[in-house]
């Protein structure tokens, strides 16, 4: 019997097994102690005796509850490359006419607004805006809600308008904290930081500090860096100055010996590899010269 070769994901249903000529009794024996298979949930079997991967759990959930369910939340964001922690439970959207049996590790939510899914690795995932909002609605901490709302913007998966439209179209109950978080979001800044971090991911450089104000030896502000490598005095600017913000001239920084790399958000989006090359060149230049006699304030070690 070569079922493990015919089921690429390793996930199969009891119905499929019966069609292949495997009786329920024989399947139960194979899933028993010492057997080569593992039963993940009623009617769904993993064709190996090992802990399932997260993807296999998602595929098992779809096999268990049917193709009309949609995976949302953290898993839908992670499927699109977003670096966010996986949740303990699989968050599922279910048509409101469906009755869902309780299942450990599953968090089903019935809805009248089933989103158009995107199929990735055989799993139907909710759009990024819906996934982020569904995830944020589960949180109570305002700071954590702010972070979750920013994720699809940070990774360039949707716009702030799409988030607002999705939130307005949904149930308003329990959405006050999420609405407040959306009002606090600066989409351009969030997107720019995301692009910058993606550009750095391909660089052989240590992690910088973010959003730093640079001061002279007397503590007077002379410039700002969107990213800053403090040990060598390398500054990177990629955002346009905000209206009403202090208008520092680049010469004030370079006069101290600070190596300054500048680019635009458009360059980050269109030619990130060229930006990364320039950063590596700037880092090497700064490493060859004495560190400038400057101080910093407002350091943030992780990108927002």
Image (cartoon, rainbow, N blue to C red):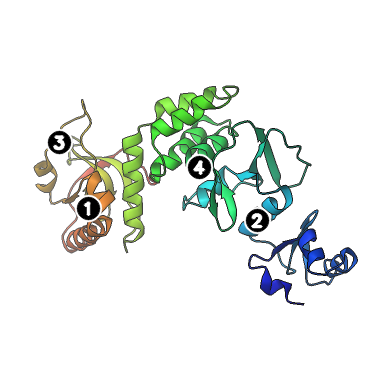
> Under tag 2, what secondary structure?
helix
**Mark nearer the viewer, 1 or 2:** 2
Q: Say which quarter of the image contains residue 150.
A: top left
Q: Specify which label sits upstream in the sequence, 4 or 2.
A: 2
Q: Which residue is mark 2?
A: 59
| Quadrant of the snapshot with the N terminus | bottom right
> Under tag 3, what secondary structure?
loop
Whether residue 150 is visible here, answered yes or no, is yes
Per the rendering, the mark at residue 234 is 1
**Mark nearer the viewer, 3 or 2:** 2
Q: Is residue 65 left or right of residue 79?
A: right
Q: Which residue is mark 3?
A: 248
What is the crowding at mark 1: few (fewer than 14 residues within 10 Å), some, or many (at least 20)? many
Q: Which residue is mark 4?
A: 127
Q: Say which quarter of the image contains residue 171.
A: top right
The span from disc 3 to disc 2 (Cα, nearest Å) is: 53 Å
Residue 236 location in percent, x, y? 23, 48
Q: How many marks?
A: 4
Per the rendering, the mark at residue 117 is none
The span from disc 3 to disc 1 (Cα, nearest Å) is: 16 Å
Q: Is residue 249 left or right of residue 95?
A: left
């Amino acid at each position: 019997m070569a079922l493990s070769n015919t089921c690429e994901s390793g996930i199969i249903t009891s119905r499929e097994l019966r069609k292949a000529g495997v009786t329920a009794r024989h399947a139960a024996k194979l899933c028993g102690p010492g057997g080569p298979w593992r039963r993940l949930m009623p009617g769904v079997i993993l064709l190996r005796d090992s802990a399932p991967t997260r993807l296999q759990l998602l595929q098992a959930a779809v096999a268990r509850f049917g193709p009309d369910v949609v995976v949302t939340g953290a898993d839908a964001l992670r499927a699109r490359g977003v670096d966010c922690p996986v949740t303990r439970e699989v968050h599922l959207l279910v048509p409101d006419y469906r009755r869902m049996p309780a299942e450990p590790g599953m968090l089903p939510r019935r809805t009248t607004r089933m989103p158009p899914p995107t199929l990735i690795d055989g799993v139907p995932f909710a759009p990024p805006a819906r996934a982020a909002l569904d995830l944020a609605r589960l949180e109570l901490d305002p700071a954590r809600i702010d972070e979750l709302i920013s994720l699809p913007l940070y990774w360039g998966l949707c716009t702030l308008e799409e988030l607002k439209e999705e939130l307005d179209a949904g149930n308003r109950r329990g959405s006050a904290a999420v609405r407040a978080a959306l009002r606090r979001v600066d989409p351009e800044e969030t997107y720019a930081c995301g692009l910058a971090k993606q550009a750095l991911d391909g660089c052989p450089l240590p992690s910088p500090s973010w959003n730093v104000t640079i001061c002279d030896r007397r503590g007077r502000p002379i410039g700002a860096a969107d990213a800053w490598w403090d040990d060598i005095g390398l500054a990177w600017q990629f955002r346009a100055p905000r209206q009403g913000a202090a208008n520092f001239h680049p010469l004030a920084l370079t006069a101290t010996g600070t190596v300054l790399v500048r680019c635009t958000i458009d360059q980050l989006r269109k030619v990130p590899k060229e930006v990364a090359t320039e950063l590596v060149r700037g880092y090497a230049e700064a490493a060859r010269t004495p560190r400038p006699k400057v101080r910093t304030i407002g350091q943030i070690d992780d990108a927002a």
